[in-house]
Image (cartoon, coloured by chain):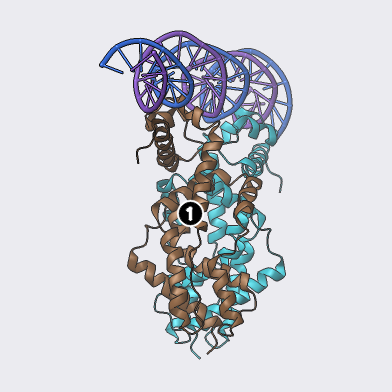
Chain colours: A cyan, B brown, C blue, D purple
Amino acid sequence: MALSRSEQKRLDIINAAKLVFKENGVQATSMDKLAEVANVSKRTVYNHFKTKEELVMHLVKELWQKAMLSSEDDYDKTAPLAPQLTKILMKEISLMNSPDYIDLSRVAMGHFLFQPEALQVEIEKFSKQETSLQLWLENATNDGLLTVKNIELAVQQLHGLIKGSCFWPQLLGLCPLLSEQEQINLADESVAMFLARYANS
Amino acid sequence: MALSRSEQKRLDIINAAKLVFKENGVQATSMDKLAEVANVSKRTVYNHFKTKEELVMHLVKELWQKAMLSSEDDYDKTAPLAPQLTKILMKEISLMNSPDYIDLSRVAMGHFLFQPEALQVEIEKFSKQETSLQLWLENATNDGLLTVKNIELAVQQLHGLIKGSCFWPQLLGLCPLLSEQEQINLADESVAMFLARYANS
DNA sequence: TAAGTAAACTGCACCGGGTAGTTTACTTTG
DNA sequence: CAAAGTAAACTACCCGGTGCAGTTTACTTA
């Protein structure tokens, strides 16, 4: 499955961008530096991406798609709730706690922090689809296994519990990534708290 | 209490910095622009602050001090837990959900995102003191009113529940600030979930 | 009350350096 | 040989920070 030379160069540029943006952010990284790291002439960079902005957007979209790819988390009416929910959370945790995701999120955040309109635009392109977590909660609530009055709030609570330990501290460089065991503990603790509040006995 | 002219100019500069940094961030704001907004000559800016960095740091320290000023939240062994915890959370929520705090946090985040070492240094200067939330949890646990095995985790969980609704979305410009009623609801919901998990019946 | 003084402020030119994006003339590769 | 890549110079800026001559302010002395 050989890539054409052009395709290869394109990948070199994208990989170099990820590498170099994550070190100092977008603004502080020049296109000259980027081309140098990619081992590509600056003109080639501009042949593949019209502007710096376009290159950044390409990376951001890649990130979004990764975060949004919804796997089929089958909701099972008869199985115990805790393991099902744990499985869903583990999937989110292991994604958000990966180096690539953190690094790219930092880049995106640095880029969008002061352009909320642009961020809104990007988000709306993807926010049509419900998350698998939300669907699961809706199913379990409709079957009377949970008592959740406000599903949006519940989703936000679960995400808050998770991200507060496995995403934001790492994004800010205040904590190292979680080990596999720590990830499992976090999922279990989050599920325990959530079900203590919402599960029907 | 009249301020000397120099003190007044200094305040003008600081206020202009808050105003102008919050619009486009630190990197994207020139010192010429800042001086113009402050109605002060650029030379005067540099007379008060040796470098741009020093000015930014001044703002950040101001933010930290506001966030850290711990009030005496008296723990009361005999009173019901929920209202006590709600009160503490409300104080944190109303601080974190204020425009000044959000705006300055955004500036600080944009500045430190790619300088984790510098952030570490700043944080360590302030992180000696325990938060009032942590103290309260320790007291309630020692008195057997709560069963919390891991207090640090519990603190992080509470902060996650709160910040996930009243801080991070606003920092990113995805949600408007919470109304007083929404703040109260958030505090109540967070307390309800927390106590459902940890309170001894 | 008038003259003097030190400190702070102003405005502007200036410096060294950096950047996004373009152009050109030439070379490599499929 | 046509499409893509290369190196290097080039345009047209912007920015942090400094130096300096001259002015304003507030306060004090004669």
Say which quarter of the image contains residue C5. top left
Say which quarter of the image contains residue A168. bottom right
Residue A116 location, x and y as percent? 42, 48
- Residue A49: tell me if it is visible: no
Q: Is residue A188 above or below residue A124?
A: below
Q: Dot 1 surroundings within 10 Å: few (below 14), some, or many (20 or more)?
A: few
Compare residues B152 and A4 and report the one nearer the observer. Answer: B152
Compare residues A93 and B175 and report the one nearer the observer. Answer: B175
Residue A33 location, x and y as percent? 65, 32
Q: Residue at x 53, y 55 (%)?
A: A64
Q: Is residue A181 above or below residue D5?
A: below
Compare residues A165 and D8 and report the one nearer the observer. Answer: A165
Q: Which residue is mark 1?
A: B66
- Residue B192: tell me if it is visible: yes
Q: Which of the chains bears the disc numbered 1? A: B
Is C19 displayed left or right of B171 in the figure? right
Is B172 displayed left or right of A174 in the figure? left
Q: Residue at x 43, y 43 (%)?
A: B22
Is B185 displayed left or right of A83 in the figure? left
Q: What amino acid type should be assigned to the residue bearing mark 1? A: Lys
Q: Residue at x 44, y 38 (%)?
A: B14
Is B44 displayed left or right of B197 in the figure? left
Residue B194 location, x and y as percent? 51, 77
Residue B199 location, x and y as percent? 53, 84
Placement of the N terminus of chain B among the 4 image quadrants: top left
Number of marks? 1
* Secondary structure category for the residue under label 1: helix
